[in-house]
């Protein structure tokens, strides 16, 4: 499998002028040293987006959207990061072999992905041998034909516990790497295959690279768990992937909706039946990263989780989390069988499709849910129920929905419509005050230390001399976030011997934990001049603030210390720090 390296991507970036690329989508006007345009990422009526030719980044001053030339194309065209790289390359007349990067990942993980691909091939091949007859039978009986076995890369791990291990050793892969990607296990100094005696299903990341496997029993064994999954590894981060995401993408665009199910067998079952805009969350709770992936699809979400109380509770909490992120959420609750897989096996795919014709809104689901375990003929229960529904209504921005719901409640429970409306009005006011208060806190949150540290990071992105200056004059940050970014910068510079803000953005584009902070720091620097003198000012300031902080901590220690000798030692330390400050 071929992969494009970060180096090649940086090369494309340096040949592409962000002003030309964004200019090919939107009209730009020059203002001073930057260019301005109407921001395509929010409902913009005056030009709020600034594009810097000098820094090769863009920033919207209204909605905060920011990044380099690739992130712009990625968001504007709604494609994967790598597809964005290809589009930019094409626009600049750089020819690259499309097969090189289609569905592959940028990165240093080339060998790791090779191992996973080999493992997949090995498992797939086993299914075709004499050892695979029973497993193949099992799959066919469950309605998974040859075509879909191939499509989903389904395979078989053998009874013997070191066949894959031996094969990979023969291919000269190092044992550490095999352990790293979780394809083998170690006990004492013996190594053995992670998966044996099970049907294997590859798991992919958002770009379609195999990052792990899930494996299930098929011979009715009783003494072992039904599924074994890859452990979390450098490649496999369960909470950051959605099963079938890369395959479902195009179908989601067509259907303008994405169906979210719990298990990957549910997803395969629907896909086999022709409902292809489906992803599985492989658990019950959506993570922040998974919601981010769903947002990228720009379509409504239909939650169709298991038909048990855990599935119902998960529908409630996941729905809530997605609504908060601005997604349009619908709900399907199946009845009879326990999950979509069994539902389709029992009733056929057409029955499932009927559920898709008119799914209930999340709002309706919630209103129904609130009724549960309540006796609405009891006044207290009814009051509690109505109050909760009104709170939901107050959170909604849909005026028609609000009107209809209030009317319905008023008629159903014989309550005055005017009173209900007044109550919602009051609740709405409280909500908007909450939002304002939160915004204020967020704005005030960055103190002098944080702001100056941001600037130091920004300078470090502008060349080796700034990194040297940081190492010489400061060398560390008090807080984990800046420390981690600084370490990444140093690592990146050592590897590439060159650094600049837009290329570093590419580098962190798949590092969820620091990406947003780096983007923020870079965009805040869009109009900054860089020089060692200015940087020294910030270094000095942070150094002083860290000493001040240290003194503060020592003073607290001093207060709590009872031993006189130790007290003197702490006082000495404080005096020393004060001198240095
Ligand atoms: Zn904007």
Image (spheres, rainbow, N blue to C red):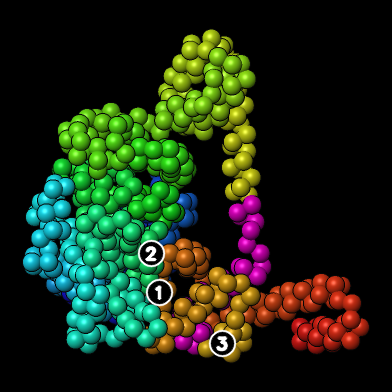
Does the residue tagged 3 have its C-beta within 8 Å of any atom of ligand 1? no
Q: Is residue 1 left or right of residue 372?
A: left
The residue indicated by pointer 1 is 504
Looking at the image, which residue sits at the far right?
Answer: 564
Where residue 67 appears, x then y in whole percent? 39, 63
Which residue is found at the position 19% from the left and 86% from the top? 170
Q: Which residues are magenta?
A: 441-467
- Look at the image and tell me in which quarter the C terminus lies: bottom right
Asked if one can make out residue 196 in the rendered structure from this viewpoint, the answer is: yes
The circle on residue 471 is 3
Let me know if residue 524 is in the magenta part. Answer: no
Mark count: 3
Per the model, the C-alpha gap separating discs 1 and 3 is: 19 Å
For residue 237, the mark is 2
- SS at badge 1: helix
* 368 relative to 378, above or below: below
Q: How many other residues sit within 10 Å of disc 2, few (<14), some (14-19) or many (≥20)?
A: some
Residue, x 25% and y 68% (percent of image)?
196
Using the image as rendered, state which of residue 364 and residue 295 is in the foreground.
364
Element under label 2? loop
Residue 201 x %, y %: 23, 60
């Amino acid at each position: 499998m071929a992969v494009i390296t970060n180096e090649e991507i940086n090369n494309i970036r340096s040949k592409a002028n962000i002003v030309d690329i964004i200019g090919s989508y939107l009209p730009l006007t020059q203002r001073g040293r930057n260019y301005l345009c109407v921001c395509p990422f929010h409902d913009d009526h005056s030009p709020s987006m600034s594009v810097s030719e000098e820094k090769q980044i863009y920033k919207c001053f209204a909605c905060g959207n920011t990044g380099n030339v690739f992130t712009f194309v990625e968001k504007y065209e709604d494609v994967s990061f790598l597809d964005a790289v290809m589009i930019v390359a094409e626009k600049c007349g750089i020819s690259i072999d499309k097969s090189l990067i289609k569905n592959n990942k940028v990165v240093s993980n080339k060998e790791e992905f090779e191992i996973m691909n080999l493992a997949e091939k090995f498992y797939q091949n086993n299914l075709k041998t004499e050892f695979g007859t029973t497993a193949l039978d099992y799959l066919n009986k469950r309605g998974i034909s040859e075509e879909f076995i191939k499509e989903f890369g389904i395979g078989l791990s053998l009874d013997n516990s070191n066949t894959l291990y031996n094969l990979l050793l023969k291919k000269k892969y190092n044992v550490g790497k095999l352990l790293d990607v979780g394809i083998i296990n170690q006990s004492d100094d013996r190594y053995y295959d992670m998966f044996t005696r099970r049907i294997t299903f590859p798991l992919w990341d958002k770009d379609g690279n195999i990052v792990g496997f899930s494996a299930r029993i098929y011979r009715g064994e009783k003494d072992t768990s039904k599924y074994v999954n890859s452990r979390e590894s450098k490649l496999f981060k369960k909470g950051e992937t959605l099963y079938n995401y890369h395959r479902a993408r195009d179908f989601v665009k067509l259907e303008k909706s994405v169906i979210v199910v719990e298990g990957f067998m549910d997803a395969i079952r629907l896909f086999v039946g022709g409902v292809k805009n489906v992803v599985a969350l492989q658990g019950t709770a959506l993570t922040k990263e998974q919601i981010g992936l769903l947002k990228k699809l720009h379509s409504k979400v239909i939650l169709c989780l298991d038909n048990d109380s855990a599935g119902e509770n998960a529908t409630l909490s996941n729905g809530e989390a997605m609504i908060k992120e601005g997604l349009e959420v619908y709900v399907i609750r199946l009845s009879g069988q326990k999950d979509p897989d069994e539902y389709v096996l029992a009733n056929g795919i057409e029955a499932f499709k009927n559920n898709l014709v008119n799914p209930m809104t999340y709002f309706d689901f919630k209103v129904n849910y609130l009724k549960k375990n309540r006796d609405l003929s009891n006044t207290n229960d009814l009051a509690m129920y109505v109050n909760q529904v009104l709170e939901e209504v107050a959170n909604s921005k849909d005026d028609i929905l609000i009107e209809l719901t209030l009317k319905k409640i008023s008629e159903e429970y014989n309550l005055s419509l005017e009173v209900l409306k007044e109550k919602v009005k009051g609740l709405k006011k409280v909500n908007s005050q909450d939002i304002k208060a939160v915004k204020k806190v967020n704005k005030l949150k960055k103190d002098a230390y944080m702001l100056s540290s941001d600037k130091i990071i920004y300078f470090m992105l502008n060349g080796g001399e700034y990194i040297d200056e940081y190492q010489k004059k400061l060398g560390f940050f008090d807080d984990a976030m800046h420390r981690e970014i600084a370490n990444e910068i140093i690592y990146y510079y050592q590897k590439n011997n060159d650094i600049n803000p837009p290329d570093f953005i590419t580098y962190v584009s798949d590092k969820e934990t620091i990406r947003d902070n780096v983007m923020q720091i870079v965009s805040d620097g869009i109009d900054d001049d860089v020089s060692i003198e200015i940087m020294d000012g910030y270094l000095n300031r942070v150094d002083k603030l860290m000493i001040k902080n240290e003194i503060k901590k020592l003073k607290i220690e001093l207060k709590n210390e009872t031993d006189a000798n130790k007290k003197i030692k702490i006082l000495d330390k404080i005096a020393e720090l004060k001198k240095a400050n």
